[in-house]
Amino acid sequence: MPLIEAPEQAIRLARAICSDVSLYNEEKIVRSIEQDSFFDALREELEEGRELYRSRVAPDLYQRTNYYDRAIVDVILRPKGHVKSRIW
């Protein structure tokens, strides 16, 4: 499979990966937001997603963009803005 070189495709991939992380870890995400431990609690899942993203995107595009990090915020965290937390 060829590496993704188009920004639009890389964004879609990042969002799809983060969507899966969110879908399969809903309770863990909510609990970690409440406890202000999101990145620690989901370290393994987020890194696994990052490695998948990195393996599918051209190295140049990966190095000069932050699409995966933006997808974490847009797809996983932003929809949980209603969760009570000290972080917001």
Image: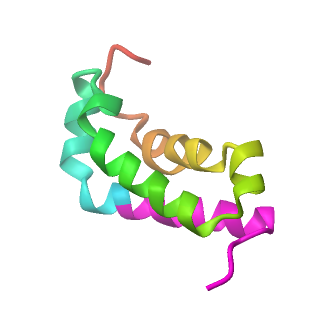
Relative to 39, 14 lies left or right = right
Relative to 38, 15 lies left or right = right
Is residue 14 within the magenta segment? yes
Using the image, determine if residue 17 lies above or below residue 73.
Answer: below
Q: Residue at x 44, y 61 (%)?
A: 19
Picture coordinates of residue 51 (x, y %)?
46, 56
Our reading of the magenta stretch's main secondary structure is helix
Q: Residue at x 68, y 81 (%)?
A: 2
Using the image, determine if residue 60 lies above or below residue 58.
Answer: above
Is residue 52 within the magenta segment? no
Relative to 78, 11 lies left or right = right
State the image quarter where residue 61 is shown: bottom right
Q: Nearer the viewer, residue 39 or 56?
A: 56
Picture coordinates of residue 25 (x, y %)?
25, 54
Q: Is residue 15 at all visible to an observer of this figure?
A: no
> How many numbered marks does the figure carry?
0
| Range of residues picked out in magenta | 1-20
Q: Residue at x 58, y 49 (%)?
A: 68
